[in-house]
Amino acid sequence: MISQLGIIGLYEKRKMARILTGIQSSGKPHLGNLLGAILPAIALSKKERNDSYFFIADLHSLTTIKDAELRKENVRSVAAAWIACGFDIEKNTFYRQSKVPEVCELAWILNCFTPFPMLANAHSFKDKSDKLSDVNAGLFVYPVLMAADILLYDADIIPVGKDQKQHLEMTRDLGLTFNRKFGDTFVIPEPQISNQMEIVPGIDGKKMSKSYGNILDIFQPDKKLRKNIMSIKTDSLALKAPKNPTTCNVFKLYELLGSDEEIEVLRKSYLGGNYGYGNAKQELFELILKKFDKERSTYDKLISDPESLENMLCEGEIKASKIAQSVLARVKDKIGF
Ligand code: TYM
């Protein structure tokens, strides 16, 4: 039985945790996605007792991407990134959100229990509606679909970046409200946000985001990647001048990837003067090539074989559908459908 509060979740009793997370296919997966979600989630999935559900949020991407070919291409990139980074799709469940349509039915049910002001006050809606020309209803109910993504799979732990914190709070609120009204139905999930990787900065120093166009795509071919890194914004201090590592975007990114020793060497070069930002960018480029060498070559192989990627996803979708159907049946039973 699910605990009354649901907060403890089933996993303490099951002695295993169900980990779930998703990445939108609204662009190419970037370093913020990798460090904020993909790598921490894969680390959790490797614990023997954990059972992981990782998916591509292609329905969410429809709020911004209307081009079918572009979305398909993004879906393949996100899928290849997960697998290239070491997600074991045999042990776990890997799927496209849209291929398990029960999520839309649950989202509708949850919509009918979602107070309007909760959505009107969502940071991400306010942020997006200020910036985008296409402010559609999908953007408004985005957090409800996300709650459905999570609650549909009895998920316990949701590894995400800090920008998703409010969405997780809404998910918990919706699950708890439903449980109070209808009795234990949903497992109430807990977010897991890595402190160090809370918000990975983009090449302009703001939060790295597909929608700000400031991403670092580590899976690009060498030349493009180097160009991407060379475009990181810095101040215009002369070569001779000592530089401040703590305010420099190049250093901040290097700090997230390098070993303590490597970081120390770069810090000394900054403080010592006669060291240009071009040199620091070259160091960052070489570090990325070294650190993600295996991932980059696996990604290239996967992306050149779309048929295999398709088959891998289809297998996961069969597994995901089974649990989705059983949780949805539990919910519908409670509300009299
Ligand atoms: P999305 O696609 O914007 O981002 C995917 C994941 O990457 C994290 N992230 C970052 N972390 C640190 N620094 C950054 N600059 C950065 N940019 C992105 C995000 O926090 C996220 O964890 N709504 C979600 C997708 C989603 C989802 C879900 C996630 C749909 N349903 C259910 C978890 C559970 C989103 O837009 O992520």
Image (tube, helix red, strand yellow):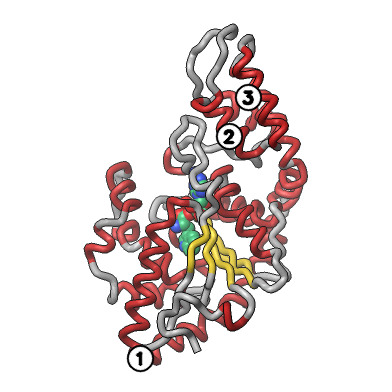
Sequence order check, earlier mark of 2 and 1: 2
Q: Nearer the viewer, residue 170 or 72?
A: 170
Say whether disc 1 or disc 3 marks the residue closer to the N-terminus.
Answer: 3
Residue drawn 57% across the image and 77% down it: 11
| 3D distance between C-alphas at marks 1 and 3 | 63 Å
Mark drawn on residue 253: 2
Q: Which mark is residue 267?
A: 3
Please state which of residues 282 and 324 is positioned toward the viewer in this rendering: 282
Horizontal side of residue 324 vs 115, given as left or right:
right
Residue at the spot 60% in from the left edge and 48% down from the top edge:
34
Position of the C terminus by quadrant: bottom left
Badge nearest the viewer, 2 or 1: 2
Name the residue at 39% across, 70% down: 172
Residue 159 quadrant? bottom right
Q: Is mark 2 within 8 Å of ligand 1?
A: no
Q: Measured from the top left, where is residue 210 in percent x and y?
A: 47, 43
Q: Position of residue 6 (x, y in %)?
A: 44, 79
Q: Element at badge 3?
A: helix
- Whether residues under marks 1 and 3 lie with C-beta atoms below 8 angstroms apart, the answer is no
Q: Nearer the viewer, residue 323 or 132?
A: 323
C-alpha separation, residue under disc 3 versus residue under disc 2: 13 Å
Residue 25 visible somewhere in the drawing: no
Residue type, numbered disc 2: Leu
| SS for dot 1 | loop
Compared across the picture, whether 105 is left or right of 90 comes to left
Q: Which percent across, then down, holds residue 140?
A: 30, 59
Mark 1: few, some, or many residues within 10 Å (few <14, many ≥20)?
A: few
Q: Amino acid type of disc 1? A: Phe
